[in-house]
Amino acid sequence: MQKKLHIKKGDTVAVIAGESKGRKGRVLEVNRDKSKALVEGVNMVSKHTKPNAKAPQGGIIKKEAPVHISNLMVIDPASGKPTRVGRRLNDKNKLVRFAKKSGEEIK
């Protein structure tokens, strides 16, 4: 069985620990097995590449590296600040995520 995570692809998150602390970005990909997420513009690493069809010149390419889920917090849609996430049943009897700070539903 896979773990339930508080972060999904497409969420806007803030980094709360590590080298990229304080940065915000959109989640591009979530790896549930390793509990890691790829966040746009966060945790950039340099990758040395040989010349190929994609990069005919080769050289050093900057790209995002995965960040552990525990170092990320979802941004509250109402206030724009990091918040914890809860789950509750909405009026249509469907389980939805909500921001604990404002109580607003996270889309």
Image (tube, rainbow, N blue to C red):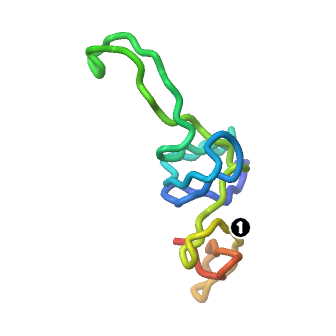
Describe residue 11's horizontal placement relative to residue 95 as left or right.
left
Q: Pinpoint residue 54: horizontal percent, then vertical percent.
A: 29, 22
Describe residue 47's horizontal placement relative to residue 6 as left or right.
left
The quadrant in which residue 93 appears is bottom right
Residue at 54%, 43% in the rendered image = 42
Callout 1: SS? loop
Residue at 68%, 43% in the rendered image = 68
Residue bearing mark 1: 84
In the displayed structure, would residue 8 be above or below residue 21?
A: below
Residue type, numbered disc 1: Arg
| Residue count near mark 1 (Cα–Cα under 10 Å), binned few <14, some 14–19, many ≥20 | some
The quadrant in which residue 90 appears is bottom right
Q: Pinpoint residue 80: horizontal percent, then vertical percent.
A: 56, 71
Q: Single out the residue that lies furthest toward the top.
A: 50
In the displayed structure, would residue 30 be above or below residue 81?
A: above
Q: Pinpoint residue 86: horizontal percent, then vertical percent.
A: 71, 72
Residue at 65%, 45% in the rendered image = 32
Q: Pinpoint residue 28: horizontal percent, then vertical percent.
A: 48, 48
Residue at 48%, 46% in the rendered image = 40
Describe residue 88's horizontal placement relative to residue 57 as left or right.
right
The quadrant in which residue 76 appears is bottom right
